[in-house]
Amino acid sequence: MVSLSTVAAPAAGVVPPPPSPKTKPVSVAEAHAPTIARRHLLLASAASTLPTATASAAAAAPSFSEIPGSGGVKALELREGSGEVPADGDQVAIHYYGRLAAKQGWRFDSTYDHKDETGDPMPFVFTVGAGKVIPGIEAAVKSMRVGGLRRVIIPPSQGYQNTSQEPIPPNFFDRQRLFTTIFNPTRLANGEGSTLGTLIFDIELISIRQHS
């Protein structure tokens, strides 16, 4: 099972934070063991700054929030959109990066790998409210604005319930591995159904064609 820290880490296509500045080289003279007095000062200084550092790290840590009425889908905003919000009947185009939590975050599909004749990535297009895609993706997209990018954790109840729901990985081996994991009868009988089908999607809303 993939950890939450892994889930919150940026995936492919997401710009990582700038690297920390290089550590300044330490001379041999500076590398000598500190005196007792200096050691006490260092310990006191570390003790006084530790709570502040911990609080700052906690405040900076990303957090997921549940999408209202989604059946338990949780979202982490990676980039706020500024365009329209889709409604039922609208045709939307999205890029996605799908991973399976039960396989340590194994990537089973990505629209960025689906190329057209010119070599450009082909987005996934569907009609909101038509019931052809898994509910978790619909819930995530319906609360996004065009241009937005978010990471969602989709529980099994809002993920794949059968092998005909979209999006379906075009690669046969990826498709087989995905569905044999989610619908593994032995593991389902052992009570693992609450974890086998948990999905992690990075979703970018590209465009909306509004229903007339």
Image (spheres, rainbow, N blue to C red):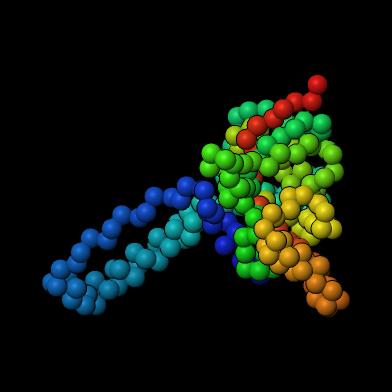
User: In the rendered image, is residue 138 in sight?
Assistant: yes
In the rendered image, the residue lying farthest to the front is 117
Tell me the residue at 68%/37% (across/down).
Answer: 93
Count of numbered badges drawn on the protein = 0
Q: Quadrant of residue 103?
A: bottom right
Q: Position of residue 15 (x, y in %)?
A: 47, 47
Examine the rendered structure and indicate whether residue 139 appears above or below residue 193: above
75 vs 58, left or right, is: right
206 vs 194, left or right, is: left
Q: Quadrant of residue 126?
A: top right
Q: Position of residue 53 (x, y in %)?
A: 44, 58
In the rendered image, the residue lying farthest to the top is 212
Quadrant location of the N terminus in the rendered image: bottom right
User: In the rendered image, is residue 200 in sight?
Assistant: no
Quadrant location of the C terminus in the rendered image: top right
Tell me the residue at 13%/72% (across/down).
Answer: 29
184 vs 31, left or right, is: right
Examine the rendered structure and indicate whether residue 204 appears above or below residue 110: above
Tell me the residue at 19%/67% (across/down).
Answer: 26
Q: Position of residue 131 (x, y in %)?
A: 85, 43
User: Which residue occupies the foreground of this view, 4 or 112?
Assistant: 112
